Amino acid sequence: MGLFGSLYIGASGLQTSQNALNTVAHNLSNVDTQGYTRQQVAQADRSYNNISKDAKIVSYKQTGLGVYYSRVRQVRDYFLDQTYRREVGRMSFYQVSYSTFTQVEDLLGEFTGKSFSESLGNLKEAVDELAKEPASTVKQGLLIQRVSQFLKRAKTTYNDLCDLQDNYNVQVKNGIDRVNTISSRIHELNKQICSIEIAGFEHANDLRDERNSLLDELGGLINIEYKEDYDGAIIVKAEGHQLISRTAVYELAVTADADNGFYTPYWKMDAKTITLANGTEVPDISNCKVFDLTQVMSTEKNTDVGSIKAQLLARGDHRANYTDLETDTDTYNTNISQSIIMNVQAEFDKLVHIVATKMNEVLASAADADNGYLVDKDGNPLQLFQKITSPGYDENGNYIPEDASPGQANTLYTTANMIVNPDLVKSPSLLKFINGEKKEDYATAKLLQDVFTDEEYVLNPNNTNRCNVLDFYSNIVDQISIGGSVFKSYYDNQTTTVESTEYKRQQVVGVSDDEELNNMIKFQNAYNASSRYINAIDEMIEHIINTLGA
């Protein structure tokens, strides 16, 4: 190759070194950018010129044509990315679960001084005082006051649990909307990346960074599987169903329950439309629900992944009451126990139901219509607690809807449909506790005491240990405390796993100042070497032309 051709070799070195320095500068300028993946320069030699070919020799006589900047590649570990996204999803699942236990514990107020146990203890104390002087109007008034406080605190606690369900319901809707937004953006990025990289000359690294960040976020919301196609497009499955293909995004949608407004996510494109009797068209989601919540949540089966699933499990599918515990163990474990809030709702409502019905039964058993003892103006047994007989508002301003099941409306003593007998609230002395023989009714007062001391109640179908009313509530609190501790350990362990995986991942994708400065020195020296090479060629040409006169 002539001297003038050698200038092109030097020029290729200058250009390649300059481009490499630009890449180093790009890395250093993004050292603190969230989601940025460090870029690495790949250089290659240009094609050789063959001077001569001889089959007898090991290699042909060739001259090189310089170097070129072949590609800038992202430095990522595919398996670390997959592990990180799966473990982030699992961490999000246990974070929501642990947070739910914490919130329920706060609602019961055991650590804030406004606990339900205080009102329960006060009620028992009022019954104990009444047993000492049943005919005392002061003690009767105190009993009604404590009963009212007990039910008011019970309704507040139960409504707070319902509000927590509603809060999670909103979060589920927002999570589904976010999944759709992320999916649409990833699909758009797929098209942009493919159009840039299809010629094979350029890599859309910054677009890939954005897509990777979105995959990280998506992995925290829902259980995903993905792979990169031959042309750089990412194909994603969510909960085993296609979410993003090469040509489309399969959107998720939600349908609200007519009774409680709870959202159920489903695959929009798979749902058939059915027409109700009133002409309304609704989606049939029976075979296209996104999440199978009947599965056992297990790390081994990868069913404990994603914050949306955890929110759905914590929320449950209805407002639970004590009737949800009157079932077999398998049904309870499938439909109730996996929902933290529903389980506490049912157990808490069972406690209130026990107190109300047992105290009412005691008064009913002692009622004597002939002598007008413990009966109302219609001759019916006088009751401390009454059921709301039609939809409306109770004395605390809480709206009480009709039960959704035909023929079952307002027939059960639940926290939601009880009030304290208004007649007794106005005139506690109606209790009297002076029987037909004109004697103080110590026996009935003693039976009221027994309501709180008899050990004949079980917490749920899984717990067959019998306890009294006070221990019943303590068992609810202990159950929440133990469950919270268990899920906290899961969450802490998962956090450690995620942090460890992210540390390893950052070792690969993160920008190291020291490494980039070393690269800068290396490429600067290469640039200077190419410059000196060109100067040497230039001096040789000048010497040949000016000195030798060639």
Image: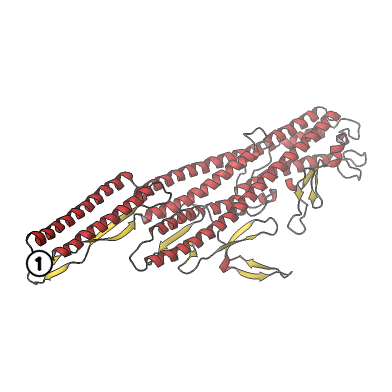
* Residue at x-position 57% and y-position 39%: 481
Tag 1 secondary structure: loop
Which quarter of the image is occupied by the C terminus?
A: bottom left
Can you give x and y, in whole percent of width and height, for residue 151 in the image? 75, 40
* Residue at x-position 53% and y-position 59%: 181
Residue 301 visible here: no
Its colouring scheme is secondary structure
Can you give x and y, in whole percent of width and height, for residue 501 in the image? 40, 48
Can you give x and y, in whole percent of width and height, for residue 450 in the image? 74, 35
Can you give x and y, in whole percent of width and height, for residue 410 in the image? 78, 52
Task: Decide: is 319 above or below 363.
Answer: below
Kind of residue at disc 1: Val
Q: Which residue is mark 1?
A: 58
* Residue at x-position 53% and y-position 54%: 296
* Residue at x-position 51% and y-position 47%: 94
Q: Residue furthest top?
A: 132
Which quarter of the image is occupied by the N terminus?
A: bottom left
Residue 378 visible here: yes
Q: Residues within 10 Å of mark 1 (few under 14, many from 20)?
A: few
Q: Nearer the viewer, residue 232 or 195?
A: 195
Side (left or right) of 36 relative to 70: right
Task: Decide: is 296 above or below 284.
Answer: above
Q: Nearer the viewer, residue 327 or 323?
A: 323
